[in-house]
Amino acid sequence: MRKWLALILGLLGLFGAATNLPAADAPKRVFVIPIRENIDPPLTYLVRRGVKKAMEAKADLIVLDMKTNGGRVDTTEEIIEILNNFKGETATYVNDRAFSAGAFISVATQKIYMAPQSVIGAAAPIIMSPGGGGVQDMPSTVEAKMTSAVRALVRRVAEKNGYNVEVIEAMIDKNKELIIDGKTLNKKGEILTLTNTEAEQEYGKPPKPLLSSGTVDSLEALLDELGYAHAQVTTIKPTGAEKLGSWINAISPLLLIIGLIGIYIEIKTPGVMLPGIIAVLAFVLYFLGGYVAGLSGMEWIIVFVIGLALLISEFFVHPGTILPGIVGLILIIISLVMAMVDMYPGTPALPTLPQLRLPLQNLTIAMGVSIVIAILLARILPKTSIYGALVSQTASGVTSVAEQQQQQTSRIGQTGVAISNLRPGGKAQFDQQILDVITQGEMISKGQPVRIIGSSGSESIVELAS
């Protein structure tokens, strides 16, 4: 009986193991990312989205369908770093041309194939004239520095993927002479550019292609060459939102400042609503920028909303409870940072310091500027007609600055009790009325008696009552 039981359990174990194996006829997955524009920030979002979708789908191959005149070095470096996150096979199909930054990105893939009559190279760094008026002459010292930096960047990825580093450097540095097997392929003073037939010529012992693994007539022929003839192919299409996302992310610190100041004004003038609406719109744009850029999903918007709800609860529903406010503030900060952190499928859940550096920098700048603006508003805004118009709409019923000042004066001498810790600001209750109060610097604990001795804007100044 025991032998039969062991046999049955063994068969069940084998069956379970078999069900966990991938299907034998499951097609391979290929993702094609078109590089059909200048290498500018919006293209980064397209490449990032494509790489992340490929990683989520556990794709076997990413192909860059390349036709570009080049672009920015900083964007090129970012795209190369994005491609490095993909652990499967990578290839570039030079579909007509891969000039300048396009050549750099091509070298960042494991194989390069070229279409008939296509070209690759001419990768020397240049400076564009302001306003897009054309190429501007570069000072010799600047040219030397940029060329050195670009050579180091491309040399690293070329070595990693097994390309001839001297060929790549001849595309970048006009002072680089390229001689292989006694044949001068590039003279000093020129920039190397290769046709498809030149790039696939073999040199050395053993013979090795100069740059290209071969010429193929189409993307379909390339997939057949690489062994992916029957693969499931997904092409990442530009959505048109990439340029919008690039613009939004360029002003993301400003959006944070507008959002934080809007929340501050709304708290100071509860019931006005307009500052709160502006703050919400600013934060929506901020999160939209991160979403379009492929940096974050909608989950951080939910975390932000939960944090904001807890903060509102602390100020307007259960003042003085402290814990909801602290938790809400922490959730808001986490969501604002994580919305701009570049995370990839299959990587550790916790971000690294380099991933956090830019979001933390933007948030720190925004909070610092917001604090300065809030201090200035606290001193200046109550003296303006705008503030009178704002507070006239609040639930307090104050219809003008003069009436507010009269109310503040009439409260001097009143005693009440602190319903939150005053550090030095907080809330206190006087009869049935709850007021925003501030001390002259001392800390007063919740539950202690306080007396109004003056006012500052919309806040009453209090001291500890004996």
Image: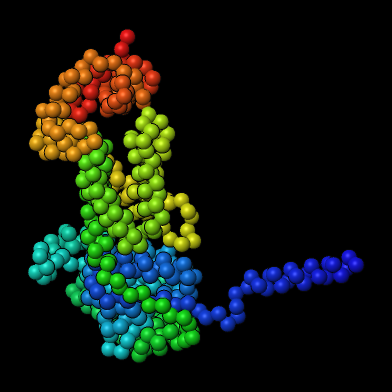
Left/right placement of residue 251 relative to residue 360 reads left
Residue 277, compared with residue 155, is above or below; it is above
State the image quarter where residue 113 is shown.
bottom left
- Residue placed at 33% from the left, 79% from the top? 65
x%, y% of residue 138?
A: 13, 64
- Residue placed at 37% from the left, 67% from the top? 49
- Residue placed at 23% from the left, 44% from the top? 273
Q: Quadrant of the N terminus?
A: bottom right
- Residue placed at 34% from the left, 68% from the top? 47
State the image quarter where residue 142 is shown.
bottom left
Nearer the observer, 172 or 216: 216
Left/right placement of residue 9 relative to residue 244 reads right
x%, y% of residue 377?
A: 17, 35
Nearer the observer, 175 or 259: 259
x%, y% of residue 103?
A: 29, 74
Nearer the observer, 188 or 250: 250
Q: Quadrant of the C terminus?
A: top left
Residue 87, compared with residue 145, is above or below; it is below
Left/right placement of residue 35 relative to residue 207 reads left
